[in-house]
Image (cartoon, rainbow, N blue to C red):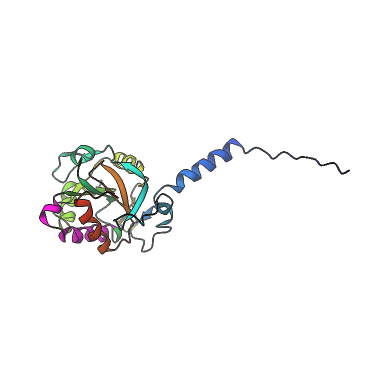
């Protein structure tokens, strides 16, 4: 009778286990894009892993499997006054986007589309939604620059600027990556950051919806009407 020898499989090293855990964590991180890139690499891959099927949702945006809390973040608004994001938007539908005013494409396109979608709502419904833009280039986006830029898209839009480390930490709690801006040889600035918009419902002040950088204007127009009414996702 042939004798069978059992060969024990080697146990994974501690380093392998750590790398595996890191890979799982990164799978849930939203995609990073450098404004100025016409087609961000893997723009939808990361977000797809944390979205659940939204076929039964009345919203057209992606429904998040994990509901994120609003970041505990206080920065300066465009009037130069402290603005506590969590407390001053409590109980209101809120769209949150991280970007910078000298961005050549993704940021103005995204904020412009939201501005047009907001203009389609009644004045009463517009008052029920906060649109918050947090600068990822605070060294250049002072309150005056930020206000001037936002006014071309929505005069009621809230602009926040301040300590970049605080901005990066706040974005990280949402799975959005923000990197330090890079000043290029020609003097232009590139700020790499997650280009997704998160929507927080007024019922629990948590992010339930996500919109990628290529979201159509009609999707924003459809969903903003529901957000103003506090419709569950």
Q: Nearer the viewer, residue 199 or 74?
A: 199
Foreground residue among 211 and 85? 211
Residue 79 lies in the magenta-colored region: no
Question: What are the residue bounds of the magenta stretch?
Answer: 107-127
Residue 46 position, x and y percent, is 42, 52
Q: Is residue 26 left or right of residue 189?
A: right
Q: Confirm whether the magenta stretch covers residue 112.
A: yes
- Quadrant hosting residue 14: top right
Compared to residue 170, the image places residue 233 above or below, namely below
Count of numbered badges drawn on the protein:
0
Residue 14 seen from this side: yes
Q: Residue at x 61, y 37 (%)?
A: 13
Q: Is residue 194 visible?
A: no
Image height of 165 relative to 225, above or below: above
Question: Most extreme residue toward the right, as rendered?
Answer: 1
Whether residue 21 is situated above or below residue 216 in the rendered picture:
above
**Residue 135, x across and y down, in percent:** 26, 48
Rendering coords of residue 4 (x, y %)? 81, 42
Q: Residue at x 80, y 40 (%)?
A: 5
Residue at image point 33% right, 60% down = 36
Front residue (pair 164, 60): 60
* Residue beneath the point at 54% across and 42% down: 19
- Tell me the chief SS of the magenta region: helix
Q: Position of residue 223 (x, y in %)?
A: 25, 56
């Amino acid at each position: 009778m042939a004798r069978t020898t059992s060969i024990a499989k080697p146990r994974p090293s501690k380093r392998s286990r750590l790398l595996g855990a890191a890979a799982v964590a990164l799978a849930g991180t939203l995609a990073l894009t450098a404004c100025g890139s016409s087609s961000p690499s893997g723009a939808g891959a990361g977000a797809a892993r944390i979205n659940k099927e939204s076929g039964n949702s009345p919203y057209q945006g992606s429904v998040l499997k994990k509901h994120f809390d609003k970041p505990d973040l206080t920065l300066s608004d465009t009037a130069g006054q402290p603005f506590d994001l969590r407390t001053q938007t409590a109980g209101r539908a809120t769209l949150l986007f991280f970007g910078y005013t000298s961005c050549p494409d993704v940021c103005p396109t995204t904020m412009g589309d939201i501005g047009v979608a907001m203009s389609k709502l009644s004045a009463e419904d517009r008052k029920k939604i906060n649109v918050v833009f947090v600068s990822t280039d605070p060294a250049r986006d002072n309150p005056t620059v930020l206000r001037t830029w936002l006014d071309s898209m929505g005069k009621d839009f809230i602009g926040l600027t301040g300590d970049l480390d605080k901005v990066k930490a706040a974005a990280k709690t949402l799975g959005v990556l923000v990197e330090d801006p890079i000043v290029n040889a020609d003097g232009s600035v590139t700020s790499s950051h997650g280009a997704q918009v998160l929507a927080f419902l007024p019922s629990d002040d948590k992010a339930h919806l996500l919109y990628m950088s290529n979201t159509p204007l009609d999707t924003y127009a459809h969903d903003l009407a529901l957000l103003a009414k506090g419709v569950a996702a």
